[in-house]
Image: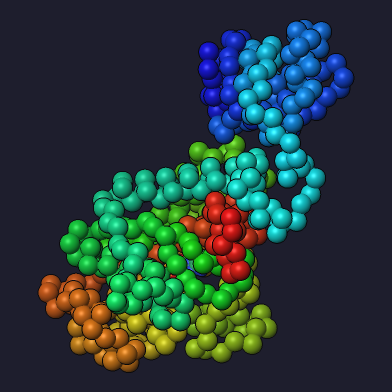
Amino acid sequence: MKAWIGTIGEYVDEEVTIEGWLWNVRSSGKIIFLQLRDGTGFIQGVVVKSEVDPAVFAACQNLTQESSLKVVGKVRREERSPSGYELTVYAVEPIHITSDYPITPKEHGVDFLMDHRHLWIRSPRQRAILKIRAEIIRAMRSYLDGNGFTQVDPPILTPSSCEGTTNLFHTKYFDEDAYLTQSGQLYMEAAAIALGKVYSFGPTFRAEKSKTRRHLIEFWMIEPEMAFCTHQENMDVQEAFVKHIVSHMLDNCELELTTIERDLAPLQEVLAGPFPRISYDEAIERLQKMGHDLKWGEDFGAPHETDLTNQFSRPLFVEKFPAAIKAFYMQPDPNRPDVILGADLLAPEGYGEIIGGSERIHDLALLQKRFAEHGLGREYEWYLDLRRYGSVRHSGFGIGLERTIAWICGLDHVRETIPFPRLLNRIYP
Ligand code: 4AD
Ligand code: MG
């Protein structure tokens, strides 16, 4: 019977056929250990010379790493194996014999592995990360779908920018100029007025010349937007959302998190209490006390975020940034118009910003003033209509999928969180 390794426990003491690949092989002369994978999991197949047809044993000796094959054997419980099972192999049918597979069990440099990303994703660690990615997406959707949000898909080709013009990818749209989207937010605001609570989930593009462990050129973002929602309520939703993701991952991905040797204690700690909330003012004071040469009005860099988050064990909201360093659409604090009613959520363990969010300006005159200050023109006219017809207080946020994965996996670079990363100087493979 055809079986998948992921559900092999259903076939204990039965004879099964597995179709897959050999990712490693060891031999002791009389026994060959086939490390098999079929995409759904990994299992060890044991071929004992004295118990199989000599032709089968000979065929096994010719198998090479990443050859594809069909294996027939009996499933046994094996407590010492990570999967909990082992296969006693009776027959092996090679499908395609591989020669000179480039990624061997020895150490390879990151550039080499990145050049072979199309093959590297077969390895147990990379596979586990991609499984975790899929499960984080499921967790994000299940929270939003279960809490009255409707998915709305904003366009990817846009006539204007959302987060400022410095990092746009330009393209021609027939005779007009167009840009790849930096964020669907402005469209999601229109959708929130139409549908109440909405979210988008899609690719986002930033032509940033940043070569850091947190920056991708193409990344995926989830952008919830809520009508009749204040800055405080926005943070409450973000906290519940992030806790849901972490708790879902601890419940559903222990095998993959263990495969990549993630320490689970800091993730459990995320669920243990409320997320601290501090103002930008307080953050600046804390950073200055730590010896950073940073003045009020300046934006944080990665080292600032890292040092700040290291003072806390749970994700940290930093709210009320100076209006001058944030996007044009953010609602000013009525008691103090030089700061905005918005927050960044910084992940613990030094990871830094995973969410940017705010209340949006709902007053037409104030938004028109911002337009004038930022030189925004006719291509945004429709956005002003949202303030002309039934304007309400509304808020939303954007969570970067890859930064969230990097944090939950404990990775030191976002490049491993996405199947085929687009980085400064890399668009291959
Ligand atoms: O802070 P950002 O730029 O906010 C926005 O785009 C808002 N319009 C979102 C909203 O309110 N709807 O980006 C949001 C998140 C960041 O916190 C970060 O997690 C991620 O997107 N992000 C990146 N991830 C990887 N590579 C990059 N270059 C990223 N830039 C932002
Ligand atoms: Mg941001």
Residue nearest the observer in this picture, 102 or 328: 102
Residue nearest the observer in this picture, 130 or 24: 24
Query: Could you tell me if residue 83 is visible in this image?
Result: no
Instruction: Please tell me in which quadrant of the rendered image residue 119 appears.
Output: top right
Q: Position of residue 26 (x, y in %)?
A: 80, 28
Instruction: Determine whether 160 is above or below 260 in the image.
Output: below
Residue at left 48%, top 61%? 219
Residue furthest to the right: 29
Residue nearest the observer in this picture, 378 or 115: 115
Quadrant field for ligand 1: bottom left
Instruction: Please tell me in which quadrant of the rendered image residue 224 appears.
Output: bottom left
Instruction: Determine whether 231 is above or below 88 in the image.
Output: below
Residue at left 62%, top 84%? 288
Residue at left 50%, top 38%? 252
Residue furthest to the front: 175
Instruction: Determine whether 266 is above or below 39 in the image.
Output: below
Q: Position of residue 38 (x, y in %)?
A: 59, 30
Query: Could you tell me if residue 14 is visible in this image?
Result: yes
The color scheme shown is rainbow
Q: Position of residue 175 (x, y in %)?
A: 29, 76
Question: Quadrant where the C terminus lies?
Answer: bottom right
Q: Left or right: where does residue 377 sit relative to residue 49?
A: left
Residue at left 52%, top 86%? 298
Total labels: the figure holds 0
Residue furthest to the left: 389
Q: Left or right: where does residue 292 sit relative to residue 155?
A: right
Residue nearest the observer in this picture, 226 or 119: 119
Q: Position of residue 220 (x, y in %)?
A: 45, 59
